[in-house]
Amino acid sequence: MAIQLLVTDPALRVQGDPLADWLALDATVRFNEPGTGSVELVAHPHVMAQLQPGNRLVVIRDKQIWMAGPMEIPQDFSWGIGGEGEAPPGKVTVNFSDDLARPAGYLTWPAPASSWSAQPDTARQITSASGETIIRTLVNENCGPGALAARRIPNFALGPAAAVGTTTSVNTRLEGLLATCRRVAIDGGGLGFRTRQTSSQILFEVYEPADLTATARFSAGLGNLRAVTYRQSAPTVTHALVTGSDQAVPRAYVEVADAGAAEAWWRVEQLVDGTADSDATGELTQEGRQALAEGAAPVELATVTVDTEDLKAGHDFRLGDRVTVALPTGVEVADLVRSMHLQATPGVGEHVTSLIGSPEATTDPQIVRVVRELGRRLGRIEAR
């Protein structure tokens, strides 16, 4: 096991020596979402001195950064004498996220270059551009170098453009920034986005996940498949019937269909209350495609895999990559890597698992998913 823990300040300067006397580490990175983690440490004075508000925790595994980001709870301390609590000098638990948590705290302003008091009633529109260009633009103008000075994330910049993604559009107003980016990523070619720490900056990158279905394989026979659940069900929508804004005359009506799903199963219609006045730039079509993506996935797959010498998370495959899972029934299913979970203790070693499956394959509690969906819907109402 080769794990190193460092603390940096907001300017990415390392604070003190590496945190050597740690007791347990738990860190999960997620596809197009902020990761979360915690670490338990012996509360030596020199350790406590590093755990200050605004500082960041960097987890390095095999000489590569596994996860890095701000400490959300820098000090959760416990101490006691005579069997109560933790023996001196005590124990401290740090809860941290990765650097995607910073842009996750922003909303999409309709006029990002203007002050809050000067925001118009209209929505921010970006039309007929690649998914990568739209995502980079939204991030740059809301929290990146192109944002108002008060909204810029320190030491945060856009990485080199990757020239990926298909042409799409976006219409947004006061939605969660990353929620909007996820919507564009789906419609713009199944893109991924992430942050990457360099020596002096946190770079935001958009990328195209790799198709590793021929080389990254998981099965009981290979010893890297720990658990699997698989369900094949009928789609909840095959025909999205999108209506444009009721303020437009005449009102726009757009039908977006998944003919293949309708033929394999049956026709299922869903009314989608669109936010644009017309489909001149494809915005209503985009909202219809999003409805199909959310409701037309008849195969739901959730797996837990483990690292082997031949196939390691973060090395041989990464978040968003498409891999193959061979079920014990003989069926093979290809799907995306949704999260990678690292657990480690100095005495036992490390244990890495990956979650592979459809968007429904999640470890989030149901209430969390409901709250996220309500937030997305409220944002779309604001965009009207």
Image (cartoon, grey):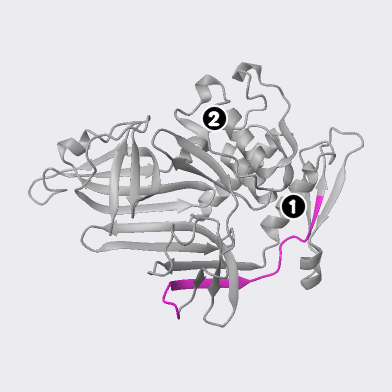
Quadrant the C terminus occupies: top right
Q: Is residue 79 left or right of residue 260?
A: left
Label for residue 115? none
Q: Which residue in the structure is indicated by mark 2?
A: 143
Local packing at callout 2 (Cα closer than 10 Å; few below 14, some 14-19, many 20+) is: many
Q: Of all residues shown, which one is farthest toward the left?
A: 82
Q: Quadrant of the N terminus?
A: bottom left
In magenta segment, residue 240: yes
Count of marks overlaid on the render: 2
Instruction: Give the class, few, some or many, for how many residues have Cα within 10 Å of label 1's Cα (few <14, many ≥20).
Output: many
Q: Which residues are magenta?
A: 221-241
- Residue 110, x across and y down, in percent: 67, 27
Q: Is residue 14 visible?
A: yes
Which image quarter: residue 214? bottom right
Q: Nearer the viewer, residue 73 or 181?
A: 181
| Type of amino acid under label 1 | Arg
The residue where tag 1 is placed is 289
**Eye-nearest disc, 1 or 2:** 2
Query: Element type at marker 2?
Result: helix
User: Which residue is located at x 74 percent, y 45 percent?
Assistant: 167
Residue depicted at 59% across the width and 42% down the height: 179
Percent x, y of residue 305:
44, 68
Direction bottom: furthest residue: 329
Q: Residue at x 44, y 52 (%)?
A: 29
Q: Amino acid at mark 2?
A: Cys
Residue at image location 24% in from the left, 64% down from the top:
348
| Image location (x, y in percent) of residue 45 | 16, 36
User: Of helix, strand and loop, which one carries label 1?
Assistant: helix
Task: Identify whether 302 is placed above or below 340.
Answer: below
Residue 377 occupies quadrant = top right
Task: Determine if residue 378 is in view.
Answer: no
